[in-house]
Image: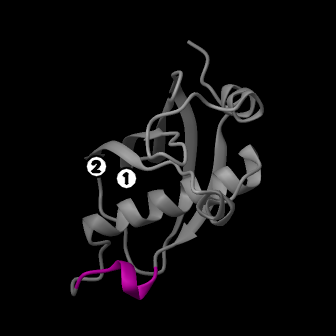
Amino acid sequence: MTWHRQIRVEFNHCDPAGIVFYPRYFEMTNSLCENFFREEIGISYAEMMAQGIGVPTVRIDCDFRAPSRLGELLDWTLVVTRLGETSVTFRAEVEGRLSIRLTLVWLGPDFRPTPWPAAFRSRLAAHQETP
């Protein structure tokens, strides 16, 4: 199942030419994941931090296809492409603009990779793309 979220390009996302400065896409991707975890997985980043756990990004890469400009409304999609024992890989896209692949790892309070709790794993699996 694909998850959607719209993000409007704001002034703070842009360079002097009025197009999105590429690192801002990574900030948008982080916002996308943070909202996905809160709304779909059932745990917010704030709750994770309070419990001493988290999902840091361990890999990210991006293909840029076309610029995005100030004021545009970007329709982001997020889908799980791989669900591992302790990690998850997502594809985050804005059709025609960019495609980002990122891997997050579930860390326990000892800051070591830990298997996904069963409830979270099943919710992530519900968003996994079918081959």
Q: Which residue is mark 2?
A: 65
Q: Residue furthest left?
A: 16
Instruction: Tell me the crowding category of disc 1: few under 14, some 14 to 19, or many 20 or more residues within 10 angstroms, Cα based.
Output: few
Compared to 62, does 21 lie above or below? below
Name which residue lies at 37% across and 78% down: 13
Question: In the picture provided, is 92 more to the left or to the right than 5?
Answer: left
* Few, some or many residues within 10 Å of mark 2 (<14, 14–19, 20+): few
Instruction: Determine the secondary structure under disc 2.
Output: loop
Which residue is situated farthest in the top direction here?
131
Q: Nearer the viewer, residue 21 or 39?
A: 39
Q: Residue at x 75, y 54 (%)?
A: 39
Q: Quadrant of residue 32?
A: bottom right
Specify which label sits upstream in the sequence, 1 or 2. Answer: 2
User: Is 63 covered by the magenta stretch?
Assistant: no
Q: Say whether residue 103 is left or right of residue 124.
A: left
The relative height of residue 114 versus residue 23 in the rendered view (above or below) is above
The dot on residue 84 is none
Q: Is residue 64 visible?
A: yes
Q: Position of residue 17 (x, y in %)?
A: 22, 83
Q: Amino acid at mark 2?
A: Arg
Q: Position of residue 68 (x, y in %)?
A: 36, 67
Q: Is residue 75 visible?
A: no
Q: Closest to the observer: 106 or 65?
A: 106
Residue 13 located within the stretch drawn in magenta: yes
Magenta region: 10-15
Q: Are marks 1 and 2 in contact (CB under 8 Å)?
A: yes
Q: Quadrant of the N terminus?
A: top right
- Residue drawn where x is 48% and y is 73% of the image: 72
Quarter of the figure that contains the C terminus = top right
Q: Which residue is mark 1?
A: 97
Q: The disc labelled 1 sits on which kind of residue?
A: Arg
